[in-house]
């Protein structure tokens, strides 16, 4: 189908500007006074972290395009230069709102809660001053390395994302008779890095018993900076922070060894072009002029900050002890009902496909799947793709153990996973040392698929067990991200899984697939055909509906396909957490398209695709978003859900999320996002509902399991279950509190 008439630039939103809208939605959570205070701090910290990555990668890429003289426009008709101009305006506005939120709302609220953040060292009491100075002498001074700039010492190399204090200093013998204000003679520049090896947030004595008072490390250093330059007067001292281009450019065709090339490029990341400078808004103009010159940075890329630089430190404040009353109770993932028994994990999977919904359900079965396979004498081989793993990954340990136990272990470790490259290199080397066959991805493609294959010898012959998922094999993020997955031993999936790993380890591409839809070759066309089928059904008067949940939507062909479906009368309901380049409400184009975004306690990460198919619904899950990079430049897997029980589960997931009116934001025709009108309606927080449902299902299943036993001896109360019930009660109470406003 030719969708050309739906591909006009005026029908699309620029990708980068859409992403900034997402960060604004995260910021709106920090501004929401209905949220617990410390949760708001957390969201503010996340907005800052998001913005850092945006500059290091997306803004950096646009600047590279400008430097290269690249004038081609994006899908919305904007050149790289035009995008940078608009991004500068929007990000300055965003940062302004960030600090307004901090200064006007959060800090006063923290004061009332008994948490005091000393904004300036000049505000310390005498007792606090003594403590801070001693802390500096004992803990900070030995670590610092002050660096001066003069004729023999050039401007020092400042590392990416580091917090530094810049100072103007003057020789004492030349300046004894001058006031600091008048000392305009021979001023030297000096700088000192605020050490990242020390805590940025330092607790100090409080004026009032029971309160908590903290000061930032840079304020401690600034207070004592004269001790670093004993022969000089410190005329002024102010913090600053730079962001460098961290977008790796790897010529994979020329790189003889991808591992070595990535290690080389990682070192360059620290010294890339400076693309953003953050300074204190009251910085001395002379000092600022030096920084502008040395970093060769334009005015539009300088952010003058009214408050502490680098708000990611608020995550440390969020973690402070003693403020649980100001935080949403931490949710404990519920056991997966099917595994609440004494059965072998492979036996459970043989009895039927198993659905997993994280973080509401525990990630333990995924870890145990690999652990048990590593120890099982009947398991012959384990194959797995790894994109991002945790710092102390139990899955890595299990894979290494499996290889040591003589299993055939093949692991694809994606070295090009952005900002996890270094971590993945470490794991890859560890796995190789244990005897695993490690594949370092494919030339020109990232492997983003989430798949594990276990080959087991059984009485009936060889059986293949498969885990397929929407999220990474990361036990840490599995508690924070919403993801779905299935276990299956359906032979058709097993054959496809084998074909996937053969494709990754060699050059064996299957002529066809039984069930899996694999990018970059087959997936986009398949999605377009599914969308077109809905359009044709709508034309025939058959039931037609598309529901899709993903992280980002910016593929122009897919969007054009959705526009076509909408113009044919298909109702299109989209849940897009982040980037959405589609416009809603365009007459004759997207009047039947509705887009919402959920920003809540957990990061929405699952990808689910529902097609009505004339009354015989098809549902798919997988690792791919509807983005060019996922569909054209990555190895991704999307898989059909055929178990009727699991299909019902997924329909329920989508139904509840489309009913969410607490954490949802609705896209408007003017490109803004607004919260739904809750007046007169029951408030539905889908994430909290899933927490309660998972806990209740686990408790019910355990109860049923006990009842089904022939003989149950008297036994003490299950403390673990009591704990879960208490947890559930806490969530119910919190939920009811919110319902009541």
Image (cartoon, grey):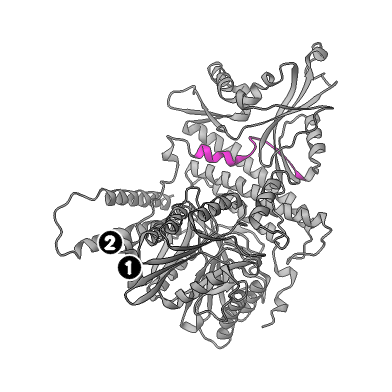
Q: Which percent across, then down, holds residue 418?
A: 62, 54
Residue 685 in sight from this viewpoint: no
- Of mark 1 and mark 2, the one earlier in the sequence is 2
Magenta span covers which residues? Answer: 301-318
Q: Nearer the viewer, residue 180 or 93?
A: 180
Residue 701 falls in which quadrant of the image? bottom left
- Residue that mark 2 sits on: 341
For image coordinates 54% across by 71% down, the residue present is 502
What kind of element bears circle 2? loop
Instruction: Judge from the rendering whether residue 449 lies leftward or rightward of residue 301; answer left or right.
Output: left
Q: Position of residue 179 (x, y in %)?
A: 79, 15
Residue drawn at x 58%, y 75% is 508
Q: Is residue 242 above or below residue 696?
A: above
Query: What residue sits right under mark 1 in the picture?
Result: 348
Task: State the quadrant of the N terminus.
Answer: bottom right
Q: How many marks?
A: 2
In magenta stretch: residue 410: no
């Amino acid at each position: 189908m030719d969708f050309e008439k739906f591909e006009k630039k005026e029908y699309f939103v620029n990708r980068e500007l859409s992403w900034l809208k997402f960060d604004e939605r995260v910021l709106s959570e920090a501004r929401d006074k209905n949220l617990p205070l410390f949760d708001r701090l957390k969201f503010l910290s996340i907005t800052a972290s998001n913005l850092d990555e945006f500059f290091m990668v997306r803004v950096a890429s646009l600047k590279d395009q400008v430097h290269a003289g690249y004038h081609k426009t994006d899908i919305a008709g904007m050149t790289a230069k035009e995008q940078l101009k608009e991004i500068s305006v929007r990000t300055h506005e965003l940062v302004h709102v960030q600090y307004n939120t901090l200064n006007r709302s959060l800090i006063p609220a923290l004061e009332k809660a008994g948490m005091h953040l000393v904004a300036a060292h000049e505000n310390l009491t005498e007792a606090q001053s003594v403590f801070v100075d001693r802390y500096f002498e004992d803990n900070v001074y030995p670590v610092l390395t002050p660096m001066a700039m003069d004729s023999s010492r050039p401007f020092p190399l400042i590392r990416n994302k580091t917090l530094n204090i810049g100072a103007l200093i003057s020789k004492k013998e030349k300046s004894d008779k001058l006031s600091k204000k008048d000392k305009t003679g021979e001023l030297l520049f000096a700088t000192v890095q605020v050490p990242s090896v020390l805590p940025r947030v330092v607790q100090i004595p409080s004026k009032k018993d029971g309160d908590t008072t903290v000061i930032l490390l840079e304020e401690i250093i600034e207070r004592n900076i004269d001790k670093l330059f004993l022969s000089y007067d410190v005329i002024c001292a102010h913090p600053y922070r730079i962001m460098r281009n961290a977008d790796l450019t790897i010529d994979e065709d020329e790189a003889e060894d991808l591992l070595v090339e990535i290690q080389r490029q990682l070192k360059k990341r620290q010294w890339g072009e400076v693309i953003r400078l953050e300074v204190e808004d009251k910085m001395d103009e002379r000092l600022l002029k030096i920084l502008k010159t040395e970093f060769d940075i334009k005015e539009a890329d300088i952010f003058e900050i009214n408050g502490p630089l680098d708000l990611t430190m608020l995550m440390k404040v969020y973690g402070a002890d003693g403020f649980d009353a100001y935080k949403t109770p931490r949710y404990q993932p519920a056991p997966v009902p099917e595994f609440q028994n004494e059965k072998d994990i492979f036996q459970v999977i043989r009895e039927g496909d198993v659905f997993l919904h994280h973080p509401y359900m525990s990630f333990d079965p995924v870890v145990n799947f690999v652990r048990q396979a590593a120890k099982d004498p009947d398991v012959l081989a384990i194959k797995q793709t790894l994109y991002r793993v945790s710092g102390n990954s139990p899955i890595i340990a299990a894979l290494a153990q499996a290889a040591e136990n003589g299993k055939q272990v093949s692991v694809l470790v994606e070295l090009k996973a952005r900002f996890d490259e270094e971590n993945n290199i470490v794991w890859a080397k560890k796995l190789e040392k244990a005897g695993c066959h490690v594949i370092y991805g494919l030339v020109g493609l990232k492997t983003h698929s989430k798949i594990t294959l276990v080959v087991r010898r059984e009485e009936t012959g060889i059986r293949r067990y498969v885990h397929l998922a929407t999220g990474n094999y990361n036990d840490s993020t599995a508690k924070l991200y919403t993801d779905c997955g299935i276990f299956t031993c359906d032979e058709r999936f097993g054959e496809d899984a084998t074909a996937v790993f053969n494709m990754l380890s060699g050059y064996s591409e299957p002529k066809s697939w039984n069930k899996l839809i694999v990018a970059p070759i087959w997936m986009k066309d398949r999605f377009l055909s599914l969308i077109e089928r809905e359009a044709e059904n709508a034309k025939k008067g058959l039931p037609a509906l598309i529901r899709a949940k993903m992280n980002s939507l910016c593929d122009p062909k897919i969007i054009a396909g959705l526009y076509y479906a909408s113009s044919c009368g298909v109702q299109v309901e989209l849940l897009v957490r982040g980037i959405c380049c589609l416009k809603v409400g365009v007459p004759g184009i997207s009047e039947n398209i509705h887009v919402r975004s959920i920003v809540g306690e957990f990061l929405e990460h699952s990808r689910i695709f529902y097609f009505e198919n004339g009354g015989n619904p098809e549902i798919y899950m997988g690792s791919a978003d509807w983005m060019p990079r996922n569909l054209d430049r990555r190895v991704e897997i999307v898989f059909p859900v055929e178990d009727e029980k699991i299909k019902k589960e997924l329909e329920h997931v989508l139904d509840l999320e489309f009913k969410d009116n607490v954490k949802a934001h609705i896209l408007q025709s003017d490109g803004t996002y607004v919260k739904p009108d809750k007046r007169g309606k029951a408030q539905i927080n889908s994430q909290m509902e899933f927490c309660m449902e998972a806990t209740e299902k686990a408790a019910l299943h355990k109860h049923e399991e006990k009842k089904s036993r022939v003989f149950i001896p008297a036994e003490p109360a299950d403390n673990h279950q009591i704990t879960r019930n208490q947890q559930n009660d806490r969530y119910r109470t919190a939920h009811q509190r919110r319902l009541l406003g």
